[in-house]
Amino acid sequence: MNTIKKFSLVLFTSAALIPVYSQAQGMQSHSMGPHQGDREFSLSGTGTSSKDFDNSSFGVSADVGWYLSDRTVAGVRQSISYADIEGEDISDDFWNGSTRGYIDYHFGSNAARPFVGASLGGIYGDGVKDTGTAGLEAGLKYYVLDSTYILARAEYQFLFDSGSSANDNFDDGAWAYVFGIGFNY
């Protein structure tokens, strides 16, 4: 079984187990969504492949956060990505990682909760220069159970080596998109 298939199996198995745990926790919950002092965990993924599956990439992101209020969460996000690229002059595998702190503000109190936020951290790996990264993000959490949600997030990330290069590199950023599942506990 190749690496991509193994990783996909682990990712989907983990995602399938989270709602089971969350449903058990939701039975003890007092209302939908988080409250000050609650924590959250989410697991998100992203990926692409060419039509022949000879050029593929995938990534996973795990978030652990703490609710500072019913609407504000601060936490740590770890992302890992893998790319298998084949071409005339190259045939290589690349692993990259990113560790970032984040803070998000959520709107509303219904099942659909849009949010905006920011992140700051670093990226490292085979296919990138080890450097700092900062970004703005927006997304939506949709609660399917009292403490379980599906998540869609878009981040605009830019790289920097120093404070002055952060300002210069903002226009040269990149978008990152993820879709996942999470729960409050």
Image (cartoon, grey):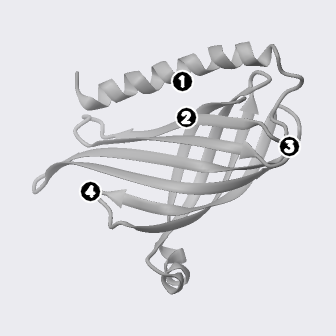
Name the residue tied to disc 1: 15
Name the residue tied to disc 4: 126
Q: Residues within 10 Å of mark 4 (few under 14, many from 20)?
A: few
Foreground tag (2 vs 3): 3
Residue at the image point whose x is 73% and y is 55% from the top: 116
The amino acid on which the numbered mark 3 sits, given as a three-letter code, is: Asp
Q: Earlier in the sequence, mark 2 or mark 3?
A: 2
Q: Residues within 10 Å of mark 3 (few under 14, many from 20)?
A: some
How far separated are the C-alphas under marks 2 and 4? 23 Å
Name the residue tied to disc 3: 70
How far separated are the C-alphas under marks 3 and 4? 39 Å
Name the residue tied to disc 2: 43
Question: Which percent across, then down, holds residue 67?
Answer: 77, 44
Q: Residue furthest left?
A: 89
Question: Which percent across, then down, holds residue 184?
Answer: 72, 31
Specify whether 151 is left or right of 71.
left
Q: Earlier in the sequence, mark 3 or mark 1?
A: 1
Could you tell me which quadrant the C terminus lies in? top right
